[in-house]
Image (cartoon, rainbow, N blue to C red):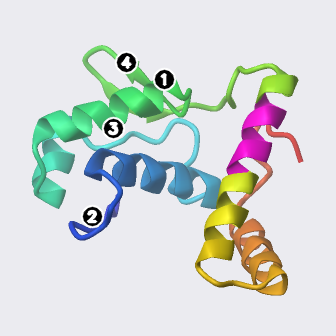
Amino acid sequence: MLIHIDPQSADPIYEQIVFQVKGAVARGDMCAGDRLPSVRELAREISVNPNTVVRSYQSLENDGVIVRRQGAGCFITDTTNALSDDERDKQLHALMERAVTEAFHLGFTKEAIKRAMNQGLKQVRFERKGSKK
């Protein structure tokens, strides 16, 4: 698994790991049942403290993206978030509002934001079991 950490990023390293794993799943690069590297393997591969990887894996587990199997490691799940539809809708709207607001403050036009959103949608594989289209 290829994880690239940007030490200059304002995002904490553990969040960069979380986002990259979620992105790999969304693109179909990782599928249900795929095993993540062990904490030590990933920490060594990307030269970070193992506690950072533990925190990332805990966040991914809390989000329902991975499941830990004692003695076997961490694996991508085949389920989506278990939140209610209303709560998921609220979170989606909050995410979109944040993205649009940040893009506005970076100076992008409405058309540029729409193009970027459409490009992002093209990169995501929506056939995941249990997903809502």
Indicate the quadrant containing the N terminus: top left, top right, bottom left or bottom right: bottom left
Give the residue type that dot 3 points to.
Ser
Residue where numbered disc 2 is placed: 5
Residue at 37% of width from left, 54% of height from top? 16
State the mark number for residue 62. 1
Residue placed most toward the observer, 62 or 130: 62
Furthest toward the front, the residue is: 105
Query: How many dots with numbers?
Result: 4
Give the residue type that dot 1 points to.
Asn
> Which range of residues does the magenta coloring cover?
88-95
Residue where numbered disc 4 is placed: 69
> Mark 3 or mark 4, which has the lower sequence index?
3
CA gap, disc 1 and disc 2? 22 Å
Residue 38 seen in this snapshot = no
Residue where numbered disc 3 is placed: 56
Q: Residue 31, percent across and down?
A: 57, 46
CA gap, disc 3 and disc 1? 10 Å
Q: Quadrant of residue 47?
A: bottom left
> Mark 1 or mark 2, which has the lower sequence index?
2
Q: Residue 65, percent across and down?
A: 54, 34
> SS class of the residue under badge 2?
loop
